[in-house]
Image: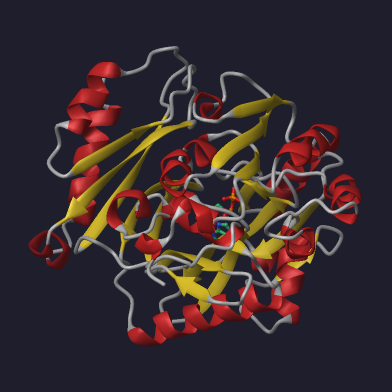
Amino acid sequence: MSQDSVTSSQISVQRVGVIGGGQLAWMMAEAAEKLGIELWVQTPSHTDPAVAITAQTILAPVDDAIATAQLAVHCDVITFENEFVNLPALAHLAQQGTCFRPSLDALRPLLDKYDQRTLMESLGLPTPSFTLKELAPHAESFPVVLKTRRHGYDGQGTFIVHTPAELEATLADLASVPVLLEKFVAFEQELAVMAARSQAGEIVIYPIVETQQENQVCRRVIAPARVNQSTTTLIEKIVRTLLTHLQVVGIFGIEFFLTKDGTVLINEIAPRTHNSGHYTLDACETSQFEQQLRAICGLPLGSTAMTSAGAVMVNLLGYEQSESDYATKRQALAAFPHAHVHWYGKTESRLGRKLGHVTVLLNEADAMQDQAIAIAHQIESLWYSS
Ligand code: ADP
């Protein structure tokens, strides 16, 4: 059945509850409307982006399982826009019949970075060497990467340390926070891919993209990545193994390191929509947000094909503490040829905070000539100029 032939009468899921009301939930709005699905969110603040687009908001922290129980009363299925959830508390709801997609079992090994690495190792999937902090590295293995096991995002909680003294100081700063240490990977490129799995086990995989980080924060994404067929085949195999093993129903974003000698290592698995998939809103037949809804609502999965020769997505990160809505800058960005500006409606700008993103669609000639980076820099100079 083609996705266009789906009518609202075929949709058994009518209300979706989303735990978390940030920009990822906000970006589900258009797809929800298209599919005739009502969105409810559980989020702590009335200023959170998704509050503006949802049918109902339950104002509560994302790890408040009592609030999730309320959400469950009203919704046919509950999904996630972040992984800062209280799994043991949610398990009681699952036992009483609340439908979580992806399931809590699929999420369980992924909420903690050490557990993620252990899972990958047990599945024989390539991952950087890792250890717990008690097993401190020898001086010759520096630099090393120290990561908080939970609640890391946008590089918060990831520290590249160069000396034993720096390691000791960082560990002291983190005091009692559980951490893991991993080998520093001298990667050539960082790659990412979005993939969705349906209840019936169908898996669809989006094009592999290149992500570029600065200070551990994603600055831009280039779609598709310029990678050879063996890398593509390997990454798709890893994705299928993982999604099938976890019996995922939903969408995942998976990040990789690619080294000079062609080695692929998994960096991180996000059990939800992801920043590296934002380009799909403007550049693919089915956005990652529509795909998430399709997967969790039991609808046929959509095509992951790109609708342009390429695309570059640039994050608009806060560069100051301010309450501005940056209207003039947004106008300038919107006037850029083939640019699509997504502004998350946050009321406060802070250093490094994701305030929006811009996707520029590339024509054949630009994609062929590797113009993506040059275009990204033009967008960045419009945004970060004073
Ligand atoms: P977060 O969960 O905050 O996104 P990540 O674990 O993805 O944190 O790390 C953020 C960035 O830090 C990565 O995209 C990469 O640039 C760098 N990084 C993380 N782990 C390593 C590693 N083992 N070796 C080299 N760089 C790393």
Q: Which quadrant of the rendered structure holds the C terminus?
A: top left
Quadrant of the image occupied by residue 227: bottom left
Residue drawn at point x = 63 percent, y = 58 percent: 271
In-image side of 129 versus 383 (left or right): right
Where is the N terminus found, in terms of image quarters? Answer: bottom left
Q: Is residue 131 left or right of residue 366?
A: right
Residue 285 coordinates in the image, percent (x, y): 32, 60
Question: x and y percent of residue 207 in the render?
Answer: 37, 69
Residue found at the very far front of the displayed protein? 9
| Left or right of 384 on screen, residue 254 | right
Residue depicted at x 11% and y 64%: 364
| Residue 145 image-quadrant placement | bottom right
**Near-viewer residue (141 or 17):** 17
Q: Is residue 95 visible?
A: yes
- How far across and down, in percent of the image, does residue 183 sit? 64, 67
Quarter of the rendering containing residue 366? bottom left
Q: Residue furthest left?
A: 365
Q: Quadrant of ligand 1?
A: bottom right
- Say whether residue 143 is visible: no
Depth check, front residue: 130 or 15: 15
Q: Position of residue 47 (x, y in %)?
A: 56, 19
- What residue is drawn where x is 30% and y is 29%? 384
Give whichever of 12, 337 is nearer the camera.
12
Residue 70 higher or lower than 86, as above or below: above
Query: Up-down: is 34 above or below 288?
Result: above
- Which color scheme is applied? secondary structure
Q: Residue furthest top?
A: 323
Front-lying residue, 326 or 38 = 38
